[in-house]
Image (cartoon, helix red, strand yellow):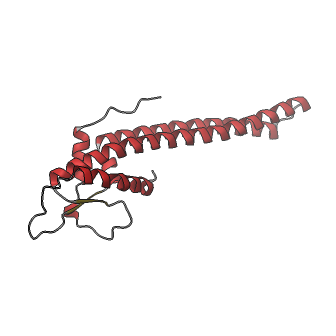
């Protein structure tokens, strides 16, 4: 997945939710200053049950498309070999050449359609997960009390103490409020 773009989207949409959900009446602890936490959206996605199931489905879809692509490629290769090795009539040769061109076009379209289908599903999954994650991060932030939650997936962060990581809390809450799996083709 395009984790950098995904992380950027998550950070851009998380800040407004946190601003709305954090309790402004709750003062920072005396002498502590601003409390900061961070979350790793990519890791949360990989570790939560929903993310694991979705990754498994995406992997299965990708593998099915690869197998189908390989089958189509074998058929095309077989026709190419037949054209090179066979003594064919001029008419049969022309027909086979047309079939090879047709198979090449179909194979190219298949590749484009398969990639488009996988990309579309990934975008749908990312969008749905980003929406859920925003809410869950806001809930965890209210429970844990930080005034700021950073997205550790952003390259802007130079260092963060592991003690500020709320990713496991986010994963637990994602799993506790699990959504149904994606519909199968």
Q: Residue at x 61, y 35 (%)?
A: 71
Residue that extends furthest to the front in the rendered view of this protein:
25
State the residue at coordinates (12%, 56%): 26
Residue at screen point 32% across, 32% down: 180
In the rendered image, the vertical position of residue 185 relative to residue 107, given as above or below: above
Left or right: where 47 falls relative to 109: left
Residue 144: x, y in percent?
16, 54
Q: Residue 142 at what x, y percent from top left?
A: 18, 51
Q: Which residue sits furthest left?
A: 30
Instruction: Name the foreground residue: 166 vs 82.
Output: 166
Instruction: Pinpoint residue 51: horizontal percent, then vertical percent.
Output: 34, 43
Looking at the image, which is closer to me, 114 or 104? 114
Above or below, 165 relative to 62? below
Q: Going by the picture, which residue comes out furthest to the right?
A: 90
Q: How many marks?
A: 0
Position in image of residue 167 (x %, y %): 25, 53
Query: In which image quadrant can residue 183 be found?
Result: top left
- Residue depicted at x 41% and y 43%: 127
Say which quarter of the image contains residue 101. top right
Quarter of the image where one finds residue 56: top left
User: Relative to residue 171, is residue 181 drawn left or right?
Assistant: right
Tell which of 26 and 6 is nearer to you: 26
Q: Nearer the viewer, residue 53 or 127?
A: 127
Relative placement, left or right, of 100 versus 20 is right
């Amino acid at each position: 997945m395009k984790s950098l773009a995904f992380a950027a989207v998550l950070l851009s949409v998380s800040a407004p939710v946190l601003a709305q959900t954090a309790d402004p009446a709750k003062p920072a602890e005396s002498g502590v200053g601003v409390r900061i936490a961070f979350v790793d959206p990519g890791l949360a996605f990989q570790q939560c049950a929903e993310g694991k199931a979705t990754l498994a489905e995406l992997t299965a879809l990708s593998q099915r498309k690869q197998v189908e692509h390989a089958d189509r490629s074998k058929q095309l290769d077989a026709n190419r070999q037949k054209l090179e090795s066979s003594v064919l009539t001029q008419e049969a040769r022309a027909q086979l050449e047309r079939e090879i061109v047709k198979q090449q076009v179909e194979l190219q379209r298949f590749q484009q359609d398969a990639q488009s289908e996988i990309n579309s599903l990934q975008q749908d999954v990312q969008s749905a997960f980003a929406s859920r994650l925003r809410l869950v991060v806001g809930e965890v932030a209210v429970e844990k009390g930080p005034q700021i939650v950073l997205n550790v997936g952003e390259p802007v962060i130079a260092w963060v103490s592991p003690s500020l990581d709320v990713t496991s809390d986010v994963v637990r809450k994602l799993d506790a409020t699990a959504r149904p799996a994606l519909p199968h083709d």
